[in-house]
Amino acid sequence: MTPVSSSPDEDFLLRTISDGTASETGSSFFRALVKNLSQALGTHGAWVAEFLPEPRLLKAFAFWLGGEYVESYEYNIEGTPCEQLLRRKTHLHIPQNVVDLFPGDPDLPKIGAVSYIGFPLLDDNRELLGNVAVVDTKPIPESFRSLAVFRIFAARATAEILRLKAESEMMSREERIRGIFDGAMDAIVELDSNFRIAMMNPSAISLFGITPDTVLGTLFQSFLPPQDFRKLVNLVGSWKSSRQRDRKIWLPGGLTIINKIGDPICTECTLSGLEMHGKPYYLLIFRSVKDRYEAQKIIASLKDEAHYLQDEIRSLANYGDIIGRSDALQQTMKLVAEVAPVDSTVVVFGETGTGKELLARTIHQASQRRERPMITVNCAAIPHSLIESEFFGHEKGAFTGATQNRKGRFSLADNGTIFLDEIGELSLEMQAKLLRVLQEGEFSPVGSSRNHRVDVRVIAATNRDLSKAVQQGTFRTDLYYRLNVFPITIPPLRERKGDIILLANHFVGKYASRMGKKIAPISAEIEEHLNSYSWPGNVRELQNVIERGVITARDGQLNLQYAFPAKEPALQDTDVECSTAPLEKILTTREMRRLERDNLLRALDQAHWRVAGEHGAARLLGIPASTLQSRMKALAIKRPGEIR
C-alpha cells in the first residue's frame, strides 16, 4: 500500500509549529505555540489554558488574538463551547454560527467569533488539565489533516503542562525539605567525599559561630579535635563497608565541636551517607548537650537548695515568735521595726544564747524579701578550708572530693537574705572575699574564673566586740564599717528580768506538749530561783534548763533539781548565803586557759568526743555546740588521731 503523503501546505504547517516552539519552554513555549498555531491555521485567535475545576475557570497560559497577546485572561466556562468539550473530553469543531449556538458566552460576540475548534488536554489517567482552542471571524471548514495536526500540537501542550506540574511539585517538595532543613533545631552538616563542608543549616551555622560564605569548602577537620576526627573517619569507613548503605550510624560519645572562638562544644551525633553521580556524601546531625548539662546543673542546684531548706525547716521547729515585754527588749524591737523594710545591712550583737538568729529571722520576715529564704551560715562551725566553697560554691574538680558543681550559700540566697552568724570567726582572707561580695555584689565559685552576680541582703551576728578585734588586727576595718550600717544589740537575759518567767512558761508548754506530759504552772519558789539565776547562757540556757526540768518532772511538777549546772546551788539551797570568802590563789591567764582546756577535754572525753546532740559535750557544758567548736579551735583541742 502506498503511504499517504502530506501536501506542501500541511508540511509547512507542521514545520511552522515545530520550528516556532522547539526551543521554548514554560511561558515562552505557550506564547510561541498560540502565535504560531493561529498564524499557521490563519485564524483570528488561539489560546491554551489551564482548567481550574473548583471555580470552573479556564486560566490562559497564553492567548493570541488579532495579532497581539491578551494578558491574564480567565474564562468562565459556564454556557461556552469550552464547557462542552471539557465535559465530553473530546475535541469540538464548530465551523460556523458559534455565537448562535452558545448565546450564554459573553466573550464570543466581543471578538466577532464565527467558528471554533478546541481540544481537551488530558493526562495519562484522562484527568482534565486544560484545553487548546482557536477562534476565527470566518468559517473554518472541516479538515482531517488540520485536526490531526491540531491533535499533535495538543499533545505537545499536554506534555509541557505535565512537565511544569512535575517541576512545580519538585520545587514545592524541595522548598518543604529546605524548610525542614533550615528550621531544624539540630545542626546539620553535609560533607563531600574529602570531608569538605558542602552545606550547613542555620542551626549548624549558629552552633559553629561562623558565616556560611566563609566555611563552604573548608575541611571539617578544622572543627574537630584530632581524636574526634579520627573517630569520624573510622565510622565513615564502617559505613562504606556496610551492606546496608542507607542506615544511620550513631557516634558513641558524640563529637566535640570546636567553634570559631575555640570553645569546645559537646554534642550527640549521627552519621548517614548518600551517593550522587557515583560520589559519596556524608550527613552529620549534631545536637548540643549543653542545654541538657545546664538542666542537670539546675536540677542539682535545686536539690541542694531543697536539702538546705529542709534543714532550715527542721531548725525552725526550735524557734517561735520573740517573747518578752521588758523595756530592754521592746527598745530592741523598735529598731527591728525601723530597719526591716529597707535593705540595709544589719549586724546583731549579743551574748551567746540571746537569740541573734531568731532576731535575724524576724527582720527577714518583715522585709520585702520574705518570699525568698533566709540562708544561714555559722562561720564558726565550718572549717577554714571549706568556708569559701560554702559561701560561693565550687566547680567540679576544684578540690579533692568536689565530684560535681555545687551552689554556695550566697547563690542560694539570691534575692533573699543571708545570715552570717559568728562573723567574727572569719579569717582575714575570707573577710576580704566577703567584702568584695558586699561592695560589688559578685563572686567567683572555687575553681571558676567566671563572676556571678547576686542581690543579697546581709544580716551578720557576733558575740565578740568587733571594734576591739579591729584594734587587735583580727578583723578588717573596711569590713567592720561595711557591716556596721545598722547595729542592733540584744540585751542579755539577766537584763530582761520581766521576761524570764514568760519564756519559762512558753518552754514548759512547748516541751510538755512534745513529750505528752501535763505540767502544773510554775510555782512561786521556782519563779524566784529562775529570776535569781544569772543565766550566762541566756535564753538558750533557760530553754535547756526547762527541757531538763520537763524530762525529770514527777507527778506533773516541774523538777529543776538536776536542771542547772553542777556548780549551781540546788533549788532547796537557794536560801543559803553565798560565800564571800576570797579565793586562796589568783590564777594567771595562762592558768585559766589551761583550766578551761582541761575542763573541755573532760567533757569531750565523757561524751566520746561528740560535740553536739543530746549526749554531746556541749550539752554537758551547758553551752552551744558552735561556742564549743570555737573554744576548741582557740585552745588547739584536736580529736585523738587527728593531725595537729
Image (cartoon, rainbow, N blue to C red):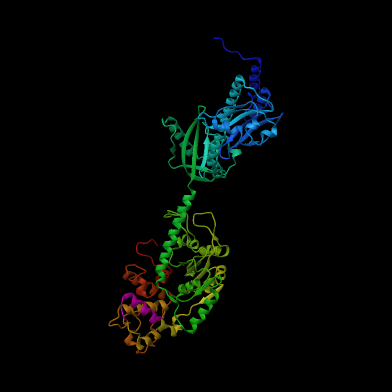
Relative to residue 424, is residue 56 depicted above or below? above
Q: Main secondary structure of the magenta part?
A: helix
Looking at the rendered structure, the number of numbered marks drawn on it comes to 0
Relative to residue 452, is residue 246 depicted above or below? above
Which quadrant: the N terminus?
top right
Let me know if residue 398 appears in the view.
no
Q: Is residue 555 magenta?
A: no
Given residues 237 and 438, the one toward you in this image is: 237
Q: Position of residue 278 (x, y in %)?
A: 50, 27
**Looking at the image, which residue is at 32% across and 84% down?**
520
Let me know if residue 56 appears in the view.
yes
Locate residue 115: give its quadrant: top right
Given residues 187 and 178, the one toward you in this image is: 178
Which quadrant: the C terminus?
bottom left
Left or right, residue 127 beside residue 549? right
* Residue that sits furthest to the top in the current view: 1
Magenta stretch in the rendered image: 503-518
Q: Is residue 506 magenta?
A: yes
* Residue that sits furthest to the right in the current view: 67
* Residue that sits furthest to the left in the current view: 555
Q: Position of residue 219 (x, y in %)?
A: 55, 35
Relative to residue 376, is residue 216 depicted above or below? above
Q: Position of residue 205 (x, y in %)?
A: 56, 42
Relative to residue 146, is residue 369 depicted above or below? below
Q: Position of residue 437 (x, y in %)?
A: 54, 63
